Image (cartoon, grey):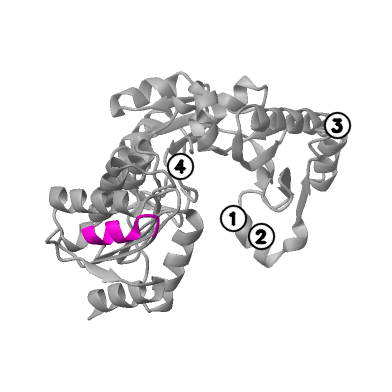
Amino acid sequence: MNIHEYQAKALLRHYGVPVSDGRVVLRAEEAKTCAGELDGPLWVVKAQIHAGGRGKGHFKEAEAGEKGGVRLARSVEEADEFARQMLGRTLVTVQTGPAGKTVNRIYIEDGSDIDRELYLALLIDRQTSRVSFVVSTEGGMSIEDVAHDTPEKILSFAIDPATGMSDFHGRRVAFELGLTGNQIKQCVALVKNLYRLFIEKDMEMLEINPLVVMTDGNLKCLDAKMGFDSNALYRHADIAALRDETEEDPKELAASKFDLNYIALDGEIGCMVNGAGLAMATMDIIKLYGAEPANFLDVGGGATKEKVTEAFKIITSDPNVKGILVNIFGGIMRCDIIAEGVIAAVKEVGLKVPLVVRLEGTNVELGKDIIRNSGLNVIAADNLSDAAAKIVKAVKG
């Protein structure tokens, strides 16, 4: 689960991390009042969406002279004008794709006198099963570009959970970033607080870009992105309350409410599979036969008829889906339950695209009988290769 920048900065502030003073604007008429509560003389007006690259983005409905989703204002009136220009419009960045995202919230904060921009992030390293720091002197840029063009400017190291965080790690970050004097002491405190926040809130990612050195020599977190482990949200009611459902794919949101593992993709063949590994194999073989999967969908090992029905509804709600492949291996999941769920879903929402069903495992013959006797136009497949070939042929002709 991701949260907005202003929410991330509130968490940082609670953990003693230096950030700018700011106000969130939900309605256009609030902008002038919010800006007036800040000191100035410089205000930063930021569109709040779950995507990076806002400053270099553009609005679909932009008028001449309007630039990006992050703008500098030099008066309360100008900050108010910028906020009104952004609210309700669609911001397109490199991370949103051409569809963009609607801006429903604006964050106005005090401007900062910046000397240097740095990069600092904490991530879960899947290879070492540890929390890793990633730091670079090239802040304010896409870290992917830095990694590609100048990888020597990135330092990454993991924290041993047996010994935990120590001042040594903070000093290592400070030296890598070229900090001196009192900045080193600030960096040690900053790194310890960020690590504590990361662990206590079950985060997956915490990115500070840029971490800035001010002209007075002090450090400040100028922007922040946070991602949380959705499986741990039951332990953090305060974090779950920050969820902005308008920023999420409606199909993925619906799937989460039924405990379905669903990820929307850009292809034309919808997939419903039980088991993550089999789902990945199904997606691969669809690509092998010349088509693209429209989603990843794992209904789980113990799915009920109701969950299968909802899964089918979610797949058919995607206008890009031109065909559906149901691939079930009945171990814990019984083939007859899947068959009943598919039939119930088809009768409820209708079937306007080709449907190929491959069943194998527990109660497979019963499942096939249910589908065979349903009277529906369902294409049966004997194995995975056969299923992929049939659905691709049905879709592409």
- Badge 3 density bin: few <14, some 14–19, many ≥20, Cα 10 Å: few
Kind of residue at badge 1 = Ser
Q: Are marks 3 and 4 in contact (CB under 8 Å)?
A: no
Q: Which residue is at a point 23% across and 55% down the rendered structure image?
A: 316
Which of the two discs, 4 and 1, labels the residue nearer the N terminus?
Answer: 4
Magenta span dominant secondary structure = helix
Q: Which residue is at a point 77% across and 45% down the rendered structure image?
A: 158
Q: Which residue is at a point 41% across and 43% down the rendered structure image?
A: 302
Question: Label 1's element?
Answer: loop
Q: Position of residue 119 (x, y in %)?
A: 68, 46
Q: Is residue 368 above or below residue 237?
A: below
Q: Is residue 222 above or below residue 387?
A: above
- C-alpha distance separating marks 3 and 1: 28 Å
Question: Label 4's element?
Answer: strand
Residue under label 3, please give it.
167
Q: Quadrant of residue 202?
A: top right
Residue under label 4, please give it.
71
Q: Are marks 1 and 2 in contact (CB under 8 Å)?
A: yes
Question: Label 3's element?
Answer: helix
Question: Label 2's element?
Answer: helix
Which of the two discs, 3 and 1, labels the residue nearer the N terminus?
Answer: 1
Residue under label 2, please give it.
146
- The residue range painted magenta reads 361-369
Q: Position of residue 271 (x, y in %)?
A: 35, 60
